Image: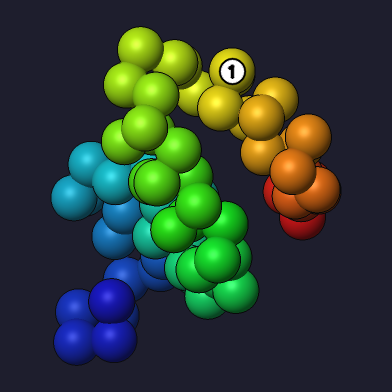
Amino acid sequence: MTVHGLSERRACQLVGLDRSTFQYHKKTGTDAVLRERLKAMAGERRRFGYRRLGILLQREGFVPSLPT
């Protein structure tokens, strides 16, 4: 954009990229403990889906975080 003097909107349009994708900034998560527990549970209970695993995590005390 700076080299060719294009606006963000025009540059994204030319490349075929949504502006929301271009503007996205990854949030660093502090959910390492949750991820490890979820992987362990999924390994123990292979037939359970994400919904059932989520219920089991809630029963263990993990509070679901809402997207901000």
Tell me if 19 is positioned left or right of 67 in this view: left
Front-lying residue, 11 or 48: 48
The answer to whether 47 is drawn above or below residue 20 in the figure is above
Residue at 48% x, 45% y: name it: 38
Please state which of residues 17 and 48 is positioned toward the viewer in this rendering.
Answer: 48
User: Amino acid under label 1?
Assistant: Arg
Q: Is residue 13 visible?
A: no
Q: Quadrant of the N terminus?
A: bottom left
* Residue 4 visible in the picture: yes
Of 8 and 66, nearer the camera is 66
Task: Give coordinates of residue 34: x percent, y percent.
Answer: 57, 57
Q: Residues within 10 Å of mark 1 (few under 14, many from 20)?
A: few
Q: Which residue is mark 1?
A: 52
Question: Which residue extends farthest bottom?
Answer: 3
Residue 67: % across, % down: 73, 48
Name the residue at 20% across, 79% down: 4
Q: Quadrant of the C terminus?
A: bottom right
Q: Position of residue 7 (x, y in %)?
A: 40, 68
Which residue is depicted at the point 70% across and 25% down? Answer: 55
Residue appearing at x 40%, y 46% in the figure: 40
